[in-house]
Amino acid sequence: MKIIYNKFLIISTIFLLVGGVYLYLSRDLNSGAIVSVAFGSSLASSNGTESSPITPTLGNDIASDISFLTTLVALKQIKIDISLFTNKSFNKLQNNAVKIESVVAGRVNPFAPIDANSIINSGSGQTVITDQPTQITDKTAILNGTINTINGVTDTYFAYGTSAQSITGTTGIVKQSLVGTFIKNVSGLTTKTTYFFKACAKVNNIALCGEVISFTTK
């Protein structure tokens, strides 16, 4: 009985294997599947029709992954230790930072026309400010002034003289710029002489002047 049972298992196994191979081959024959031979060679179907050659290509994702892995491998060659801090060049490094002193803030946009809502913050609250003179020579100098508003302003000019208590000379009317500054080049000065001047403006028919500043000709 045992011998008959073993023969039955062997025969059944053979039939199953033969049936499986037959079904697999019949499916390929019916579908005309293409069996690849090698990369870059022609592919032939079961009916003998040759297909176009196939060339394997790497997608962008694969190329990016390879580049990323290459970078990781290169990072392994970087050596990080404390030898940098004992290097002579590192120890010679100096701090060249420059301390920036605080200054009085001006207008947000200094190039905008001056109006009633656009007053320059001079710190002193003065309407007219006398600025430092420039380009001083033996007989000439440029006088500088600033006015904080253009409302009601009719004249801008400078008053100057050789004494702080009695400034007698005045320049002609000077035209102010859009940012409120005005300048005047005075000539005919005396060599090596100290002069005193102040910037002035007539606002609403009232003469207003800045502080008195001195300079000496060469």
Image: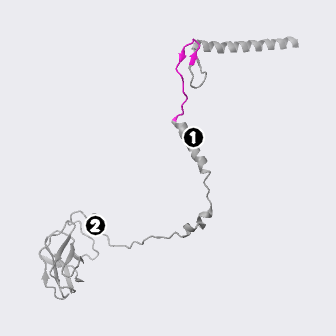
Residue plotted at (72% across, 12% down): 18
Res 217 quadrant in image: bottom left
For the residue pair 99 and 73, the one nearer the viewer reads as 73
Residue at 56% across / 44% down in the picture?
68
Relative to 53, does residue 10 appear above or below in the rendering?
Answer: above
* 54 lies left or right of 21: left
Residue 22 percent location from the top left of the image: 68, 12
Snapshot quadrant of residue 195: bottom left
Image vertical order of residue 65 relative to residue 43, above or below: below
To which residue does mark 1 refer? 66
User: Within 10 Å of the Cα at label 2, are there few (<14), some (14-19), or many (20+) other Cα atoms?
Assistant: some
Q: Are marks 2 and 1 in contact (CB under 8 Å)?
A: no
The answer to which image quadrant residue 183 occupies is bottom left
| Disc 1: CA contacts within 10 A as few (<14), some (14-19) or many (>=20) | few
Badge number at residue 107: 2
Identify which residue is drawn at 28% across, 67% down. 107
Label 2 to label 1: alpha-carbon separation: 57 Å
Residue range corresponding to the magenta coloring: 43-59
Q: Choose between 93 and 144: the one closer to the eye.
A: 93
Residue 117, placed above or below residue 144 = above
Question: Residue sitting at 22 percent across and 67 percent down?
Answer: 179
Q: Secondary structure at mark 2?
A: loop
Q: Looking at the image, is mark 2 or mark 1 earlier in the sequence?
A: 1
Quarter placement of the C terminus:
bottom left
Q: Considering the numbered disc 1 on the image, is that residue within a helix, a strand or a loop?
A: helix
**Magenta-span inclusion, residue 57:** yes
Instruction: Residue type at mark 2: give it.
Output: Arg
Q: Residue 30: x, y in percent?
A: 59, 12
Q: Is residue 151 magenta?
A: no
Image position of 70 (left or right of 16): left
